[in-house]
Image: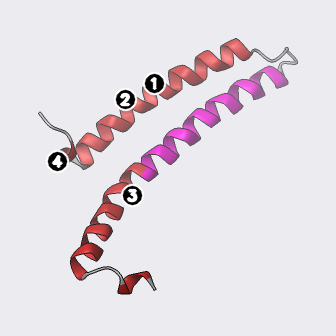
Amino acid sequence: MFRTFFTARQRRQLAAATRDRSVQIVLWAVWTLAVVLVAVASWHADTVAQRPLNLLGMSIHCTLAGLVGLIIMTKIEMWLQPWRFHN
């Protein structure tokens, strides 16, 4: 139904915008998964060792994993799509 409302040019622009976002979607999904896995690993280590849950340590580990992940994600995006970054 919506295809009848768009012209051919608008459809091409929409398809190009969707392709451009696919790299970002994959990178953000991997980043989110990495941060969650760090939290699960920290929780699992505390549980197996029968220690109380260390929320401060978990938050520090997740923050560091998130920051390193953002840097790596930006480098990958700059390598795959250099035209999106200005000099």
What is the spatial separation of the Cα atoms under label 1 and label 3, in whole angstroms?
A: 22 Å
Type of amino acid at the residue the image marks with label 2: Ile
Residue 83 is tagged as: 4
What is the spatial separation of the Cα atoms under label 2 and label 4, in whole angstroms?
A: 18 Å
The residue indicated by pointer 2 is 71
Secondary structure of the residue carrying tag 2 is helix
Secondary structure of the residue carrying tag 3 is helix
What is the spatial separation of the Cα atoms under label 4 and label 1, in whole angstroms?
A: 24 Å
The residue indicated by pointer 1 is 67
Residue at the image point whose x is 26% and y is 73% from the top: 10
What x and y, as percent, mark residue 26? 45, 52
What x and y, as percent, mark residue 11? 29, 76
Residue at the image point whose x is 45% and y is 31% from the top: 69
Which of 2 and 33 lies nearest the eye of the viewer? Answer: 2
Mark toward the start of the polypeptide (2 vs 4): 2
Predominant SS along the magenta part: helix
Mark toward the start of the polypeptide (1 vs 3): 3
Residue at the image point whose x is 15% and y is 37% from the top: 86
Type of amino acid at the residue the image marks with label 4: Trp
Say few, some or many: other residues with alpha carbon within 10 Å of mark 3 (under 14 / 14 to 19 / 20 or more).
Answer: few
Residue 22 is tagged as: 3
The reply to whether dot 1 and dot 2 touch (C-beta < 8 Å) is yes
Q: Which residues are magenta?
A: 25-48
